[in-house]
Amino acid sequence: MTGTGSWVWHYTDGAGLKGILENNVLWGSSAAYLNDFKELVSGSDRLKEVYEELKEEYAELQEELEETLKGFATPREEYFILSACEHGDSLTMWRYYGRDEVSFAVGLDRDVSLGVRAQKESDRHPSPPPGYRDGPKDPSGQLEQDPDQDGQIVEGWDEMVYDPDEQTKILSQALSDLRDAHQEAKRDEKRFHFSVYVERLSLLSQLNRVKNYSFRDEQELRTLAEVSPAWKYVLHRAGRYGLIPYIELGIPKGGTNGRRREFGDGGKQEMERLPIRQINIGPTPFPEEARFGLLQLLSFLGYHDVKVAVSSIPYR
């Protein structure tokens, strides 16, 4: 089975693969609704432990550091996660997805940036709740913070850090860099210092990579996304936790700038073809049937250059 280090592998079942290929999107679920109930919380927990071990070293800047670290309680409902794996033939992942039917690993080019699909063309909330547009206004009468301000942040693929020693190492370094930035700000006698802002973001990014050691076999890479306003991007699907918020990620036609977006007849933003390079078929006693059906669907949908391979793992 072939592969390359520049790819990531998104595992899914047959129904999920069909939806991915037909709609040119991948789903990113709200971080508050994933199997790891400490998703995006494990990092903050580890940071507290690391800081307690090292805070004597930061005694002269303890007040500044602790004030900066106060805001690291991540609002998990506002983050969406698209997960993948480092390897395209993982027994752990096949076991998870290959219950009673064939499962698949979708090989994506990790160097191609993804964006979030706009679900509505409107620039204003279609059914705003009472008080939605209340708030402080500037001298011209405009809201200082427009609730319909459009924007999205989609990070590149990041590897998760499972090993506690490695977590300590990267968080200690990030804390050290933040301390140095505060020292620079103190010397410059500035209340706001850009280097503090940058190092705070860097530390937050490292926190989001921290994952409980028990999940190490997943070898996860992920894309983390934020969107605003929620009504423009967020969808809901039924699941074990109720109605689960999710977003659609891919390559939006016209990009992510509102002025250039292209919308279809259904009101949703149109999407380009996904950067799929290969699809691996999971362990199955029916490899030829699975291969034929997949190749035919790929041909119908224009994915003519996508390679197909079958897992060699003797699992049933």
Image (cartoon, rainbow, N blue to C red):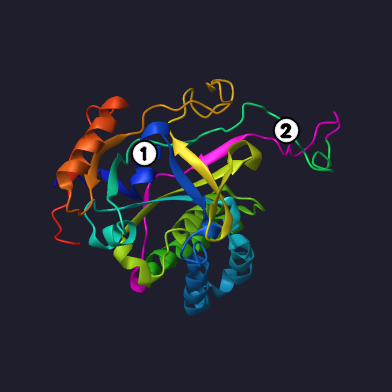
Q: Answer whether residue 35 is visible to the viewer in this image.
A: yes
Q: Where is residue 181 shown, x and y percent of the image?
A: 52, 57
Q: Answer whether residue 3 is visible to the viewer in this image.
A: no
Q: Residue at x 43, y 65 (%)?
A: 171
Task: Say what secondary structure mark 2 lies in.
Answer: loop
The kind of residue tagged 1 is Lys
Cβ–Cβ below 8 Å for labels 2 and 1? no
For the residue pair 176 and 264, the one nearer the viewer reads as: 264
**How dense is the environment of label 2, judged by Cα within 10 Å: few (below 14), some, or many (20 and up)?**
few
- Residue located beneath label 2 in the image: 126
The kind of residue tagged 2 is Pro
Whether residue 240 is situated above or below residue 78 in the rendered picture: below
Whether residue 124 is situated above or below residue 192 in the rendered picture: above
Q: Give the range drawn in magenta.
A: 138-166
- Numbered marks: total: 2
For the residue pair 153 and 306, the one nearer the viewer reads as: 306
Instruction: Please indicate whether residue 283 sits to the left or right of residue 238 in the image.
Output: left
- Residue located beneath label 1 in the image: 18
Q: Residue at x 22, y 47 (%)?
A: 281
Instruction: Please indicate whether residue 99 sits to the left or right of residue 246 in the image.
Output: left
